[in-house]
């Protein structure tokens, strides 16, 4: 038997004894060494979830005789098929046959899990364990969004709405990809101060609404943030939506209706971006390291999530 977390709802997490993973054909077992907490896990924290969650996973391959046995590897979240139209075009994250590790199949808030071989991303020796999970959502999803934005606009000023782990990671990615004059809207004092330490100018929503920005990143998952993004984007600018929620409710105001702008959604990243994402992390590892501000074993996961839910932590890690 091994131990795994189960989200019971209403903020409760139990640690249970469960059978170890039994890899199927084309899969290997991975011993979890780190799994980063993600804001998308807060909904199942409140509502409960039938499977073991955790999708920003680093582990060590446990498959004697396999070429990657003993290798540190990240888990690419979508279990892409490799043969559909999207996969053939390199858009592995858009595979319609994919399950998401840590959502539709057991994830990394556990001591081990089974992973399809094609979802193993070997981690180079120069990337330490505590930084490797940032290559998935924090860097990967943010960088994919910025690369999409660069198809329609040049690097320049940007406003990030929501300074959680994705929003703060976005500030670092924007710097790494040539953007400057960065601004942020964030109600949490702790996270706003952190954004300021990354040289982002803090604005309140009304000050932001009075200006126009060529690039808006909505990383809060709140209707108020989306409303602000659509109203504050400059004509011919772009709104990038990263935040998640169960539903939308936006009022189409004059400030939205009377201009042209682009709407971009970034969902994870194509697996071919992995090397470029490594380069972003290698360029300023000390800056990304500041995001990882807490660690805990399985028995401390509930308390770690409680602090994370109250915006008292940026990007904490489970270290089983």
Image: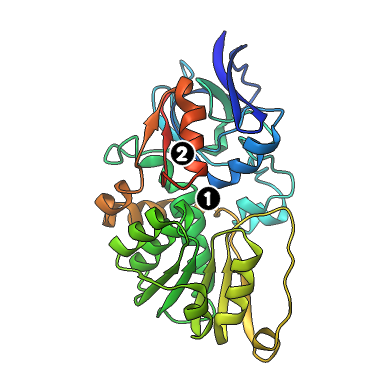
- Relative placement, left or right, of 109 versus 72 is right
Compared across the picture, whether 8 is left or right of 287 comes to: right
Q: Residue at x 26, y 41 (%)?
A: 126
Left or right: 169 in relation to 53 = left
Q: Residue at x 65, y 23 (%)?
A: 25
Q: Position of residue 201 (x, y in %)?
A: 35, 72
- For the residue carrying disc 1, how many other residues have a C-alpha within 10 Å: few (<14), some (14-19), or many (20+)? many
Which residue is labeled 2 in the image?
307
According to the picture, the residue beneath numbered tag 1 turns out to be 271
Q: Nearer the viewer, residue 275 or 101?
A: 101
Secondary structure beneath label 1? helix
Vertically, is 252 above or below 186?
A: below
Q: Name the quadrant of the C terminus.
A: top left
Q: Judge whether residue 276 can be spotted in this image.
A: no
Name the image colouring: rainbow
- The answer to whether 24 is drawn above or below residue 76 in the figure is above
Residue in front for this viewpoint, 107 or 73:
107
Q: Residue at x 55, y 54 (%)?
A: 270
The answer to which of 191 and 104 lies nearer the viewer is: 191
């Amino acid at each position: 038997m091994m131990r795994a977390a189960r989200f019971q709802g209403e903020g409760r997490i139990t640690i249970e004894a469960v059978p170890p993973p039994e890899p199927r054909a084309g899969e290997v077992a991975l011993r979890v060494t780190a799994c980063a907490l993600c804001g998308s896990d807060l909904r199942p924290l409140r509502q409960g979830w039938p499977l073991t969650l955790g999708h920003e996973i680093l582990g060590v391959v446990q498959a004697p005789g396999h070429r990657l046995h003993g290798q540190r590897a990240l888990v690419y979240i979508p279990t892409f098929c490799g043969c559909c139209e999207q996969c053939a075009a390199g858009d592995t994250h858009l595979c319609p046959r994919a399950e998401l590790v840590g959502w539709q199949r057991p994830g990394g808030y556990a001591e081990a899990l089974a992973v399809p071989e094609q979802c193993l991303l070997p981690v180079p020796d120069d990337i330490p364990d505590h930084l490797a999970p940032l290559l998935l959502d924090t860097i990967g999803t943010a960088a994919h969004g910025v690369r999409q934005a660069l198809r329609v606009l040049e690097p320049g000023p940007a406003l990030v709405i929501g300074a959680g782990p994705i929003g703060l990671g976005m500030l670092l990615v924007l710097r790494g990809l040539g953007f400057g004059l960065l601004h942020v809207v964030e109600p949490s004092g702790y996270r706003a101060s952190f954004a300021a330490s990354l040289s982002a100018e803090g604005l309140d929503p009304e000050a932001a609404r009075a200006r126009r920005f060529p690039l808006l990143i909505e990383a809060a998952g709140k209707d108020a943030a989306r409303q602000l993004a659509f109203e504050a984007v400059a004509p011919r600018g772009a709104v990038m939506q990263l935040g998640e929620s169960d539903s939308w409710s936006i009022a189409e105001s004059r400030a939205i209706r009377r201009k042209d702008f682009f709407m971009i959604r970034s969902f994870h990243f194509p697996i071919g971006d992995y090397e470029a994402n490594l380069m972003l992390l290698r360029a300023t590892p000390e800056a990304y390291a500041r995001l990882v501000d807490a660690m805990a074993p399985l028995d401390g996961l509930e308390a770690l999530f409680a602090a994370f839910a109250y915006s008292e932590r940026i990007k904490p890690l489970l270290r089983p």
